[in-house]
Amino acid sequence: MKKTRIFVLVLVLTLIAAACGGDSDDTTTTAAAETTTAAAETTTTAAAAETTTTAAAETTTTAAEMVELKVDFGVDVEAKTIKIGQLADLTNFAAFAALVNPIIDGQKMYWDYVNANGGIGDGFMVEMVTRDTAYNPQQHIAAYDEIRDQVVAISHGTGSDTNLSIAEDLAEDHMILVPATWYSGWTDTNVAPGIVHTGAPYCLEAMSLLDWLKDEEAKGGNDAPTLAVASLPGDFGLDSVAGALKWAASNGIEVVYDGKGKILPGQDNAAIGSAIVESGADMVFVTTTPPTFGEVYGAALQQGFEARWTGAGPTYNPAFIGPDSPIAAPIQRDWYGGFYSKPWGSESAGMALIHQLYEEAGSTEPLKDYITLGVVEAMIVEAALRKAYANGDMTREGVFNALYSISDMDFMGIAPPENYTGSTADQVQRSITLYRPNQEDLLAGGSGAVIVQEDFVGPTAEAFEFTEACYTIEG
């Protein structure tokens, strides 16, 4: 273990303010007045249009042939509208609202772009129907019940426990939902039909991150690093830590502190930071919310502790390296991050498009990488809608079937391609992007994430036989 003497004055309170600050007045981004469509399936004649199923492609009408288009919920053929839902944590800044608001901003930018370039099929315009669920299962259920017959798909759902609370309803409704959560159960084809996986699941992400940290320790001459783990309870923490512990067992690494499930929002988590310090760990894997990470990390810093820290993507918030953050220097030294899409500084056709949309929208949103996640979510639903239209079936079930027939989902380079066909093992994503936090990049207008390696898969993650969820959510 390496130590350094550093100050911390009222660190925890300041850190939480930096990590969670934001405007909570924006509780809905509903794009249009809502109407309830008839539940009965209808068949309507529409003009055929030849389209590609890759994201962001403009539609090109090549014939005036009339086809039969089946619709039921959320698609109005006369008005030429398609309604897409979002069940988002927009106001619970003690959880993930600071990260989710830019996701919804990214979706709005992208759907506006799709609409401006001809919409879906022969001119269907996409409208967002957004509800604030405040990361609360009861509010999530109520919001879904409110919009379920108004939308044909849901392009965002915050949280795994919240989404699991409506999983049976989603399956019954043949509704697809793109979750802002990387629980490994979404890739397990037996867990929750309709909840669409995207990005590497938490447990495989953990393996790749720790492979990276182990290599960094070896470069410094430490061939037998020790590991401390700590997390929230529930899927976010326990699925992630399950991967970390499987990694430790596979690599013969000693776990000197096991704090899985011990981080509890609303309670004093400084003791967990102290326990990590006492363990003397060389590497620390923590998966929690940004505010509670501040409590744990802050307590460790107060005691002069230095180690390599990492954890699931949503644990980290770029506000940690903001100009007023008291931990900007140590977090740049200590944090080794991974992400599910490519950071703002990457180069691709998709990233160039997102930069353009960001500028055209006049956005000043600093959490730019979460705007990218919103675009990825929208692209998934867009591809399903385009294929469903081409199939002549834009019912909810038609969109569901269209999505799960796509084996080469393309994101224009901003995220690894996805496969939604075949077995659990066929569909699993293993690639992540490695980055280090960098305040200079943030202050220069970047996202504060300097890319170390794109499309990284650690050797442990590569070798792991993924056939089912690493952690089973009970409930």
Image (tube, rainbow, N blue to C red):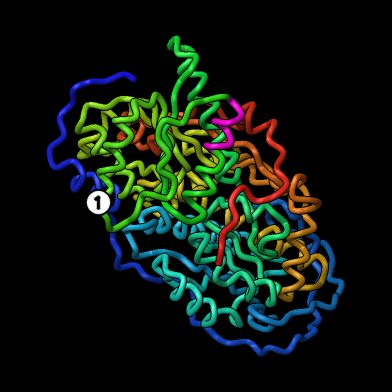
User: Residue farthest to the top?
Assistant: 221
Which residue corresponds to mark 1?
268
- The reply, left or right, for residue 121 in relation to residue 133 is right
Quarter holding the N terminus is top left
* Residue found 22% across the figure and 39% down from its top: 325
Quarter holding the C terminus is bottom right
Q: Which residues are drawn in magenta?
A: 244-251
Crowding near the residue tagged with mark 1, few <14, some 14–19, many ≥20 C-alpha atoms within 10 Å? few
Q: What residue type is labelled 1?
A: Asp
State the residue in front, 282 or 168. 282
Q: Does the magenta stretch include residue 316?
A: no
Residue 396 at what x, y percent from top left? 71, 74
- Visible residue check, residue 368: no
* Residue found 71% across the figure and 73% down from its top: 174
State whether the magenta stretch is mostly helix, strand or loop.
Answer: helix
* Residue found 72% across the figure and 57% down from its top: 189
Residue 47 at what x, y percent from top left? 80, 73
Residue 340 at what x, y percent from top left? 55, 42
Q: Does the magenta stretch include residue 247?
A: yes
Residue 68 at what x, y percent from top left? 84, 78
Above or below — where is 1 with respect to 402? above
State the residue in front, 150 or 2. 2
* Residue found 60% across the figure and 76% down from its top: 151
Quarter residue 328 falls in: top left
- The reply, left or right, for residue 43 in relation to residue 221 is right
